[in-house]
Image (cartoon, helix red, strand yellow):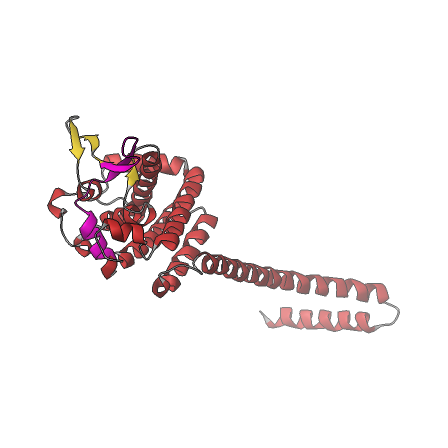
């Protein structure tokens, strides 16, 4: 600022101050006060808005954590509870932002962590080793007045009928992994095994519960598709997988609820049936 302009502004300021202090210029003084106060309020409103947003965010995250802790408060796998709560908070926060990929990833991470923990339990390993060669499905036999195990007929890649005659073949993706230790299997195989052994108590009724199991598996594979899409960012995703993802994303409002329902059923099944109940241990030939 040049010296002449600075001198003129100083003279103007002195003049305004004289007029402001003069008792006969109350209206002028009030006008000056309103201008100053309005500027202060604008600045304060900006700060208040920022503070309110921060408080709202903190309250929201606190509520999400409380919800997650309440969901997992009676969960039998206490050693992983903190991680599960963290994933749940991230999942729900992603849903709030309408971030479908992050939502699906953090939901899947809860399921995967639970399954990875269970398949390392020694009793669970022994139970699956005793059950893996049994037939996977059951139906009610009127003559025997009890449930009997039966084969499941499916179509192969050429459209021919093939029979699934063991639990391993029913659950494990690749034939070369039949009979292998649980820890060496694919993550999805582990999840499917836990769902079958724990949530469905090592049997799936052909009628009508197989429809429930099939819906459970369909939802799991849909969830896995979203998880892979988020993790791989389109890398190594086949055109078929991408097309399935697009369909899921188009109906993401419905799938938010569908995936949450799957998670709730999974957590409920594990909470009720793990450690494995006597019915499953007996089926596996493990002494009570």
Residue 23 seen from this side: yes
Number of numbered tags placed on the structure image: 0
- Left or right of 231 in this view: 97: right
Residue 158 within the magenta-colored segment of the rendering: no
Which span is picked out in magenta? 124-149
Residue at figure coordinates x 45%, y 57% from the top left:
68
Residue at figure coordinates x 32%, y 57% from the top left:
275
Residue at figure coordinates x 30%, y 50% from the top left:
279
Which one is in front, 170 or 201?
Answer: 201
In the image, residue 169 sits, relative to residue 86, either above or below, namely above
- Left or right of 110 in this view: 35: right
Residue at figure coordinates x 23%, y 47% from the top left:
189
Relative image position of residue 63 (x, y in whole percent):
52, 58
Q: Quadrant of residue 241?
A: top left
In the image, residue 162 sits, relative to residue 67, either above or below, namely above
Relative image position of residue 55 (x, y in whole percent):
56, 62
Q: Quadrant of residue 19?
A: bottom right
Q: Please state, as top left, top right, bottom left or bottom right, where the N terminus lies in the image.
A: bottom right
């Amino acid at each position: 600022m040049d010296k002449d302009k600075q001198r003129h502004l100083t003279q103007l300021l002195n003049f305004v101050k004289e007029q402001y202090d003069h008792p006969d210029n109350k209206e002028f003084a009030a006008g000056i006060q309103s201008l100053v106060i309005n500027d202060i309020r604008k600045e304060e409103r900006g700060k208040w808005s920022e503070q309110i947003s921060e408080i709202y965010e903190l309250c929201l995250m606190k509520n999400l954590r409380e919800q997650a802790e309440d969901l997992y408060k009676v969960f039998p796998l206490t050693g992983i509870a903190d991680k599960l709560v963290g994933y749940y908070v991230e999942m729900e926060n992603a849903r709030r932002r309408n971030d479908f990929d992050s939502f699906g990833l953090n939901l899947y991470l809860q399921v995967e962590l639970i399954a990875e923990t269970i398949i390392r339990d020694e009793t669970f390993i022994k139970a699956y080793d005793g059950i893996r060669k049994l037939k996977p499905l059951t139906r009610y036999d009127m003559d025997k007045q009890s449930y009997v195990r039966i084969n499941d007929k499916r179509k192969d890649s050429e459209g021919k009928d093939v029979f699934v005659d063991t639990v391993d073949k029913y659950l494990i993706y690749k034939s070369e992994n039949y009979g292998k230790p649980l820890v060496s299997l694919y993550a999805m195989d582990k999840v499917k095994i836990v769902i079958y052994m724990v949530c469905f108590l090592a049997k799936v009724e052909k009628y009508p519960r197989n429809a429930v199991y099939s819906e459970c598996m369909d939802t799991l594979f849909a969830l896995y598709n979203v998880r892979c899409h988020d993790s791989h960012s389109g890398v190594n995703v086949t055109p078929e997988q991408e097309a399935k993802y697009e369909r899921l994303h188009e109906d993401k409002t419905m799938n938010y609820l569908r995936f949450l329902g799957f998670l709730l059923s999974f957590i409920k099944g594990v909470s009720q049936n793990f450690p494995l109940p006597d019915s499953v241990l007996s089926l596996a030939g493990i002494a009570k």
